[in-house]
Amino acid sequence: MLFKMLGIQRAWQLHSEGFEISRPDTPRPRQIFVTKSSMLANKVEEYFMKLLESLSLAGCTLEELARLNSRHADRGLVDNDDAPDTQTGIPQRYSELEDHHFPLFLTFDRLARMIASDIFDADHPETKHIAKLFMHSHDAEVLDSFVSYEVFVNGYWPHFPQHLTKGRDPWLVFGEIMGIIKGSEKSLEFDDGTLDKAAYCGLPSRSNPTFSGQRETVYAIFEAYSKLKRQRQHHDVADRSHAILKTLLGGKSLKGRQVDFLYVDEAQDNLLIDALLLRLLCSNPKGLFWAGDTAQTISAGSSFRFDDLKAFLYRTEVDQASHIVRERAVTQPVSFQLAINYRSHGGIVNCAHSVIELISRFWPNSIDSLQPERGIVDGLKPVFFSGWEKSTARYEQFLFGAPGSHIEFGAQQCILVRNEGVKENLREQVGDVGLIMTLYESKGLEFNDVLLYNFFEDSNVDLSRWRVILAAIAGVAGGHNHSRPQVPSFERDESRYAANTLFKLKLLYVGITRARKRLWIIDKSDKAEPMKLFWTSRSQIQNCIPGTDVSHLAVSSSLEEWAESGHSLFQHKRYTQAIHCFRRANMPREVRIAEAYHFRELARATVGVSPVGEQRRAFAKAADAFVKCSSEAPSRERLQYYRTAAECYIRAADDRKAADAYLNAEEYELAAKRYRKAGIFNRTVDVLKSHSKKISRDCADELLTVCRLYYCSKDDEKPPSLLFSSIEEELEFLEAYGLDVALVVLYESHGKYVEAGELHLSEDRPLDAIRVFLKDKANEHAVRRAADILLDCLWKHCSFAVARQVLRSGMPKTLISLSHQLPLDPLSLRARNEIKMFQTAAVEGLDRVTLEKLAEAFMGRKENGAALWCLNHVFSSLPPLLPATLENFALFLRKFYTYSHLFYTVASHNDPVSGRGIRKLFGIVQLSDDQYVLQPGSFILATPSGASSSNDEQTNAAPHSHGQITNALKERVRLHLRYQVDAEILFCHNAKVFSQCLLYVITGSCDNGKCKQQRVSLSSLDSAQYNARVGIHLQQMRILQLVYSAFPELRECNSIKDDISGWIAHLYEAFFPPFWAQGSLANLNWSSIQRSSDGIRVMRNWIRNAIYSLEPRHSDNFLTDILRLTRLSSAFGESDALRNANCVRHPCPGMLFRSPGRYIVADMIDSVQSSAESSISAGTFGLRHIIRNNLRVHLSVLCDCIEEVLSAYVITLRFRNNPGADSLHDVVLPRSWLIRNNKLDARKEVKLIDHLLDDIQYLLEKLRSDSTEDNLWLTHTNVTPVHRSVFIARIMLCLASYNCPPRWAGLKAKISNMLTHLRSNDPTRLTPNIYRKYAEAPREGFLRVIVAYDEKHAIPNLLHLVCKGTKLGTSRFATGWHIKQLSYSRLEELPTLLASPLIAARFSLPEEVSASVPQLAISPPAKPDQVDTSVGNEPTKAHEPAGDVEGSLSDDQRPVANFVVSEKEESAVRLIQGVYRQHCRRQKRRLERSTLEAERSAIFAACLKRARASGLARGIYRLLYLGPLPHLLLALNKGIAIATSVKATTKIPGRLRREGHEHLEELARQRTEISSTLKRGYELRKKLSPDSLFHKNCDVEALKDAVLQVKEFLRRIPGTAMGVPEELDIELSVAYKAVVT
């Protein structure tokens, strides 16, 4: 083949010379010589060059000869495979080959790499893993991913099931897998490049005899191998070939020009499928030449015949010819055999050919049919030593010398053994006598003398199988010679002999053909007998037995011969043998070099077998050896040794030493890369700066970028030299990669504090941002930004309900400390107040006054969130107000109501989360239109047990929808409101200001040490006290009503009903005190009570609900309750409830019925309402039944009812006496008796006055007695004698006696006798002082006594009525008497003239006014023009705290009013009800809808608004604009959000700290990729936004293209390559189907 190449090259030269003038462009023939061995390729090229030079030095230019010489100049003692591809002068890609590169001599692996570089992109995700198969890399992962036979037998074979591998040779199995299952022609028919089980098991046994009877077992081993290989992500030689063929045969054309002639040597070492790849390279079907020897197919994975190759190439040519337009004749490939052996003489050749004959006889299809080979000359027959006993060592002594003697083999002599184990054993026995090699190691080598040692004894083929050879001996096959051993039948069990026997014969052939002159065969085993008999029968060997005179084998050699042999063995990578030769040649440097390479081979053998630590130590040992060799090597070798040392250091995981070695090897690019990998960036920068011209631009840029990233991400390390040429370049780089810390430093160094602060802020470093802003205090904008950021952080860490101690530690403490550095003058009032708020709360002692003032200021500016924050700290612990005055307590309740109402406003607001102030107050962070997260320590996360803490570990990083966060906030606020109010209720229960101690008022002392009532002296009682006490009750009821409105279900709880009943009782006592000196309704002044109208509404609602809730059967105090409620409802306009209440309409207790079946509750209601003629009589009957039957009743309430009836009697009697306008002329009565206008009615019956007086006398006697009755009781205390005396005095009959008309003398006398009867007749027991003056006063002196008593009180009670223009006389009272005179003209004027604020209030609040309760979940939203009272939803209109809310009634409690409603009114009511319910359902759905639904609705609303505003024409584009576009924009927005979150994870400094510098390149790539992707997303969002001009043209095609661009954008987001999230895919699919498809 070499001469063929030479002839073609020479012909072209001559042809070109002949046409130099006319045809200067004659193309050079492209010829490639391909082999598996790099050494062989180099040797052939060297020989080719010598021949070419000898033929015509003038045929090549000097440059061409120099180029050829440079390519193959003596590289010294180095491994040619170690030379980098870049140093061979051959391009990395096949497509880059030019004419001057030819003829080309290279290995098949190198050629495959060049082709793969053209068709596989190492950066493309789909071909990246394929390109990795062909990399000529120093990466351990890449190197170790290739499965050679050594890897297979050491790393795979032990892991296969033992029942599959037992008794089978891994060498043969590996060859079967590579050569047949994966490398045969038939494998190309399968997509995965491997025969399936059926195809493999169906192969004919004659053409594939090796495992003909074990196919299923071998295929099971192959399946186990394939599975394990996939798991380890390994590949083998067949995978590489199939990868290229699949691409080229799949339609991708070969890049580059095809060659004209292709020469393949040692073809048997390749797979058959490799032939197809090589054929595709050649354009000339007649330009392919193949050479090899199928008898030497002992290479692992080889299963080759030239007949198969010829057939395969022919079929390939036929197939190609059928696809071209012009028909081309296809001829069978021509083959010829080299029958003359130029290496060995005839004796050795004949012996070797006999082995070929055996193979051809028994396995004719396993080898090509060959002609008998002959030598040029005859020679000595091989010598077969036999006859020595195994127990003796005579022939070893004969061959190797006796112990103590030293026989040494020469440089051209070799001992061949079966395997490594035998080689080591023999060396131990005989020492270092010469070259000892295995048969596989000897392939490709030749020696003058060869000793084949124990070939048969060490084989795993037993004697019975070797005997099959005897069948080839003439006369034995037929069985005629009975002296011969019995011959087994080969045909009967052909598969038994196929695998091992065939392979051993091929090995035997290789061993024989290694000898040039002499061959010795030594074997003591019986297994050698069949072969010896066969050779003996053919006279092809010389048998040597003990005693035969045979010369010794050992022949001495010169130093030069040893050196030459050493170099040859070194080039064949037989390093241990080379070491032996170099030692014999006395060449210590070469010994060290060979040892270094040997160490490397040993290290490589540990890969996949030994532990990683052991592997690394082995490679480190080899690397150190190469470094030592380089120190004494010439320049060219030195560089290679350093390069090889670097590669070994890499495998030893010592990147620093590898980098140093590369630097010494002048491989600056690799050195820089390795320094970078070791993290030694200063050395990386030095190499880049010092050797920039010798490093590729792309590599230098990449490494410089990584160094910049590293140093710019580290605060504590500085680069050895400048990394940037200008400030602008540095700014651009830092901004591009988000290196904010370095960028901040750069900004600050140039005085750009605002930019630095904003950057800190964008990277979520607010403290640093504040500090940087404060460096520029002269800049008002910087100061304001610092304040805004500081306040945002304070709100974040100190949101609502955070404990005060938290403000004095950690982050809050730092922030508050920074707040003291802020100049306050440039700040807004809001900012100054908020800063002062946090500073005040952080001080050691609670400064309630300052916080209250701040809260008031915030409320004045409608900054209700901050106000609530302040008040929460004020009321986090209630102040010590137990001995407080009414005024102080009223102030406390007003503030607490404001605090509670702010809570209720949040809880009742339809959408509190929409307000920024709410979110700020409660630590809510809005992520998107419908996604929120809660700050750690948020009030919403805490339990309602007081204050939250920002140091709580409670976090809720998971996002919440708008509805979820709204419901959670409102529920949490409701619970906190209830918790705070419960604490306040307990506080109020312990407060004494709500009631007065009656004993102390009357007597000035109280002996009860446990008395919980306020001790107020009689002289201090005045109208202010009375109104203040009424006010605090109403205020407390307003506070409680907030809770009941927030929790409507509480109104149904019996305990809450009892609480309400208790507070109504307290309120009743405040309105109607037990003693007249404490005040009455006549003293009520609503103007002195703040927010009295709200209090009245709550009170009326409570009274109404209490009336409906009364259940006579379940209450011991029902009578007292109904009497209280009757008086209160009558006074405050809730009488309709009494008429419709169940307790009135459906009476139950029998004790409340008087004869004849009259319900006394109805009597008392009629009496109090005083509107019927029988009202006085009804009251009289009711009181009689109560008093006479000793019914349980509150004593003060009973006295109130008596006064009510008596006052009606007195006034009615006056009307009866003088029916005119002056009927009340000259009357002196308590003011409280006159304020009810229903009493001014002369028609009422008064005939039962005597019965009433009798009952009153009965009651007086009972009160006067010492016994305490259980039926009469008081609140807060027992009924003591003093209490009885007080209530006796209260029954002011004397007053009634005075005002009785003159004609009722009998009545006056009876009353006088009743009072006189109260005198004590017992000298030892005086009449109680409280009513003694009444009892002892004469009839004419009653008024004087009353006036004298009234003078002691601060509250004037008596009123003297004078009718203007009357002819009646008018009394003249003493000047000192405190009786106010009131003049009137008509009786109708009296209600107005009395000027009672109560009457004015009652008339200003008509009964039809009802207060509804906001339903928290479905309350309608405020319209834009309405006042928004939500906390934090600034701005709002100025307002006082909002009005109160009332509890609602359950359906069965509501009054049934007898209204007449028209059909039109009913229809209107139903319409309103339907619309409201629909609105409520929409609001409920809005809160319950998913996040995507909410965001999509918001986008649709924007689109609809824009469509209406812009007048978007109706048509297909409008439908797409309002239909699919919101879905598309939602998918785009979500994609941008995902990309933004991904970008946040690519922060290089943070990941550098966490992951180390090893991933900097990947981080930079990710950062660049996500930044580019995100930029594209922003562009698309701007383009497709509802108000974009893009929609103006209504271009449907453009919209289709935009949808595709959005789809591509989503695909490019890292993590979505395999599919976008499901919700995004749904949204995108809607838009895609509607717009694109």
Image: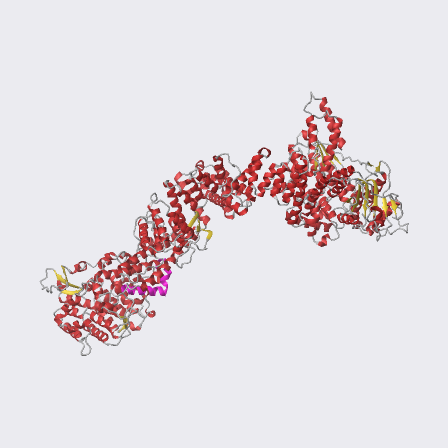
Residue 500 in view, yes or no: yes
Give the image quarter of residue 330.
top right
Given residues 1528 and 1143, the one toward you in this image is 1528
Does residue 1551 appear to the left or right of 1372 in the view shown?
Answer: right
The kind of secondary structure the magenta stretch mainly shows is helix
Q: Position of residue 91 (x, y in %)?
A: 65, 33
Give the colour scheme shown: secondary structure
Quadrant placement of the N terminus = top right
Give the image quarter of residue 567.
top right
Residue 1606 in view, yes or no: no
Given residues 1150 and 569, the one toward you in this image is 569
Label total for image: 0
Does residue 1257 appear to the left or right of 42 in the view shown?
Answer: left
Residue lying at 47% horizontally and 51% vertically, measured from the top left: 957
Q: Position of residue 871 (x, y in %)?
A: 34, 54
Does residue 603 appear to the left or right of 1178 in the view shown?
Answer: right
Does residue 1262 appear to the left or right of 385 in the view shown?
Answer: left
Given residues 63 and 430, the one toward you in this image is 430
1061 is within the stretch colored magenta: yes
Q: Is residue 440 above or below residue 1315?
A: above
Q: Position of residue 1344 (x, y in %)?
A: 13, 68
737 is within the stretch colored magenta: no
The part of the chain drawn in magenta is: 1044-1068
Residue lying farthest to the top in this orientation: 21
Q: Position of residue 54 (x, y in %)?
A: 76, 27
